[in-house]
Image (tube, rainbow, N blue to C red):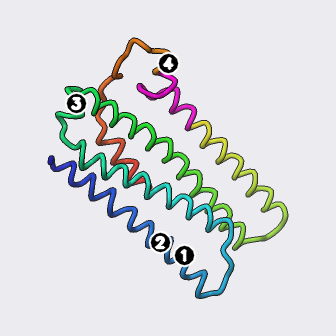
Amino acid sequence: MPTYAYSFVATNIALPCLAILATCLRFCSRKIKKQRISWDDYTIALALICTVGICIAGAYVGLVYSNEEQISGRNPGLSRLSSKVVFWDVIIGHIIFGLIKISAALFYQRIFFVSVRYNIVTYVYIGVVAAWVLTAIFGHMFSFPSGPVQCVYHMHVRYGPTIGLDCPRFAMATHS
């Protein structure tokens, strides 16, 4: 296994462990303080579940398809599968980023409740984040070389172009 594969797998294992630890500490502090669980906790828990899912898929791909020769296009089936994993990782990554932003907005709203105007601004911000997530997802669907929309318009392309897949996966693991 190449050296970058070890770092990729390690990143996909270590960073979700930190996220799990932080989320568990958050819920433990809620239990110790005897505070009820709120919407910001639910959204961060959902983001954690998505993050763990992405990182499990990333670690699996890093272990199984880490040989550069396999992904470079000499084996089109493996290249296509890796491309699909990257495609879905990026889409789920956008959803995770949106959930984290919404969780932070709801958290601040719960802690710093000042006026009705602050609530309105928070809900407008949540709408902007939701619009950003949808725009990012649709933009990715139309721009990814082997995404579902591009495959419809380019039926003559059997496997799609070969891209370096280690960088996008590593970036998604570090962002989550």
Alpha carbon of mark 3 to alpha carbon of mark 4: how far?
Answer: 23 Å
Q: Which mark is residue 127?
A: none
Q: Which mark is residue 72?
A: 3
Contact? badges 2 and 3 (CB < 8 Å): no
Q: Which residue is mark 2?
A: 22
Alpha carbon of mark 4 to alpha carbon of mark 1: how far?
Answer: 45 Å
Q: Relative to 35, is 131 above or below?
A: above
Contact? badges 3 and 1 (CB < 8 Å): no
Nearer to us of marks 2 and 4 is 4
* Total numbered circles: 4
Is 1 on the left-hand or right-hand side of 42?
A: left
Q: Relative to 158, is 99 above or below?
A: below
Tell me which amino acid carries mark 3. Ser
Contact? badges 2 and 1 (CB < 8 Å): yes
Nearer to us of marks 3 and 4 is 4
Alpha carbon of mark 3 to alpha carbon of mark 1: how far?
Answer: 42 Å
First in sequence, mark 2 or 4: give its number.
2
Give the residues in magenta: 137-150
| Dot 4: element | helix
Quadrant of residue 6 within the rendered picture? bottom left
Q: Is residue 157 magenta?
A: no
Is 102 on the left-hand or right-hand side of 21?
A: right
Tell me which amino acid carries mark 2. Ala
Residue at 62%, 87% in the rendered image = 33
Residue at 66%, 61% in the rendered image = 105
Q: Which residue is mark 1?
A: 26
Alpha carbon of mark 2 to alpha carbon of mark 4: how far?
Answer: 42 Å
